[in-house]
Image: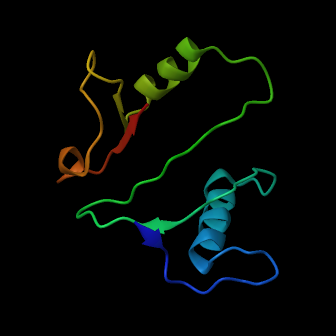
Amino acid sequence: MFCHESPVDPGTGLSGEEEKVISETHQIWNDDAVQVTPTCMRVPVERVHTEAISLEFAGEVSEADVYRVLRASPAVLLFNGPDDRGYPTALKATGGDHVLVGH
């Protein structure tokens, strides 16, 4: 694993790829107030992009509610450890267009 090769802005300390993640998140969510703190690294895997994401919610949200929303999304395949589909891997993402989510 190594840092992304895009240049780092000395004012923000962010690489060009990290700034792109922030911009794309704001665009997708149509909300510039969403706070994003990315760290982009290159990991030598074929087939996929990988992100580790931590979410903070403004109000009380149960774990069951989060799983219910993820399972209801047609674009998401939820991997919940050995009791579910195992763990998401690049190989399991091959040939698909889903977002694989795991703990």
Q: How is the image coloured?
A: rainbow
Q: Find residue 10 and report its horizontal and vertical position in percent.
A: 77, 84
- Quadrant where the N terminus sits is bottom left
Q: Quadrant of residue 26?
A: bottom right
**Residue at the image position 76 percent from the left and 51 percent from the top:** 35
Above or below for 4 versus 31? below
Looking at the image, residue 66 lies above or below residue 56 = above
In the depicted view, which residue is nearer to us: 82 or 31?
82
The residue under the point 20% across, 44% down is 92
- Residue at figure coordinates x 50%, y 47% from the top left: 52
What is the quadrant of residue 23 in the picture?
bottom right
User: Horizontally, is 48 left or right of 54 in the view?
Assistant: left
69 sits left or right of 96 in the view: right
**Dividing the picture into quarters, in which one does residue 85 lie?**
top left
User: In the image, is residue 59 above or below residue 3?
Assistant: above
Rendered location of residue 48, percent (x, y): 31, 59
Q: Is residue 39 above or below residue 31?
A: below
Residue 102 appears at what percent x and percent y? 39, 33
Does residue 26 appear to the left or right of 81 in the view shown?
right
- Where residue 82 sits: x, y (%)? 26, 20
Extreme residue in the front direction: 1
The quarter in which the C terminus is drawn is top left
User: What residue is rendered at 75% in x and 17% in y?
Assistant: 60
Q: How many marks?
A: 0
